[in-house]
Image: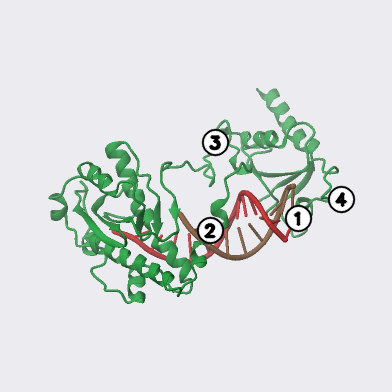
Chain colours: A green, B red, C brown
Amino acid sequence: MWIRIGFSSHSERENKRPKKGRSLIKFIDDYTVIDVETTGRDPNVDRIIQISCLTIRNGKISDQFDTYVNPEMEISPFISNLTGITNEIAAAAPTINFVIPSVMDFIGDDILLGHNVHFDVNFIYDASVKSIGSALSNDFIDTLRIARRLFPDWPDHRLSTLVTNFGLPAENFHNSLDDVIHTYRCYEYIKQLIQDKQIDKHQISAIPKRNIYSHKTSAKDIKATCCDFDPDDPYFGKTFVFTGNLVRMERKDAMQLVVDHGGQCGDNVTQKTNYLVLGDYSRNWLVKDGKTTKLKKAESLILSGQDLEIISEDVFFGMLEEYEALKGQSD
DNA sequence: TCTCCTCGAGATCT
DNA sequence: CTCGAGGAGA
């Protein structure tokens, strides 16, 4: 019996928008505010029905772009009620293929500003690829991200909450032309707070550590070279962790062997670990009391009842060889 | 100690 | 997506 396995680890998830810009946290005077209304939340199935942009120069509105878009699909009553955009309005509007060139032209190379701006950027990105074959790659600033850092104690950080808490005039929410103005005012309001030294700039400009880390190869980055596995394979469905140096092959090759047989590898011993494979760690001067951290962790997990075995390199390779030999006989 | 990484929780957009 | 907690390795 052969079955097919589909892996979907974090690191293996393909980069759907490779040219997408970076999320910046900074306060500038020249940028473009964007907001889109759509038929729903899912970029894979939903379509844009309104796009609004404001060009900001020297902190002031200097230009405006606003259009409805014909989504060429049904707008649900919920969305019509939310945004005020009916099927009649949308049907009279140009399609996205017609609108996108003007939008890209209007935006130019500006840094974009938006509230949860990933949402808007993703929709425009996908539309730009589809319509003109070139992706929206501008960097962007997210007032949601800034607000969460600045006001962690607030019960929520919705755009309407920011507007209310800042005491700014509230127009019609969920119309993108009104919402770009809301977002613009909130951003400028926060910028003013910082200029007035009412907020410590370092509180928000400090870059979280994880943002400066580059992604390196880890156990999860080793991909299977085939997709069909035998459930009777001793490695199948098991999670292996290695400690110390192996004699027979390099660790990454042993990990490759595991995933090619339907198993998984971990970088450290966790509650998911089924086997800890001991290599030679005697030459590691960090090991003081004869046991690596992984070994000690594994021993304590076994004591607490986890289905985990500590095995030698020979046992590790032996279990596969035994299985291969049996399979050879039956074939 | 410092660096780098993984995992899980929580929230926002229409 | 973003961040914090916590682990491993040096």
Dot 2 or dot 4, earlier in sequence: 2
Q: Residues within 10 Å of mark 4 (few under 14, many from 20)?
A: few
> How many residues crowd around disc 2 within 10 Å: few (fewer than 14), some, or many (20 or more)?
few
Vertical placement of A53 versus A200: above or below?
above
Identify the residue position indicated by label 1 in the image: A297
Quadrant containing the N terminus of chain A in the rendered view: top right
Alpha carbon separation for disc pair 3 and 1: 33 Å
Give the quarter of the image for residue A323: top right
Protein chain holding label 4: A
Amino acid at pointer 2: Ile
User: Does residue A186 lie above or below A104 as drawn?
Assistant: below
- Which marked residue is nearer to the observer: mark 2 or mark 1? 2
Chain of the residue on which disc 2 is drawn: A
Q: Residue drawn 44% across and 53% down?
A: A23
Which element is circle 3 on? strand
Q: Are marks 3 and 1 on the same chain?
A: yes
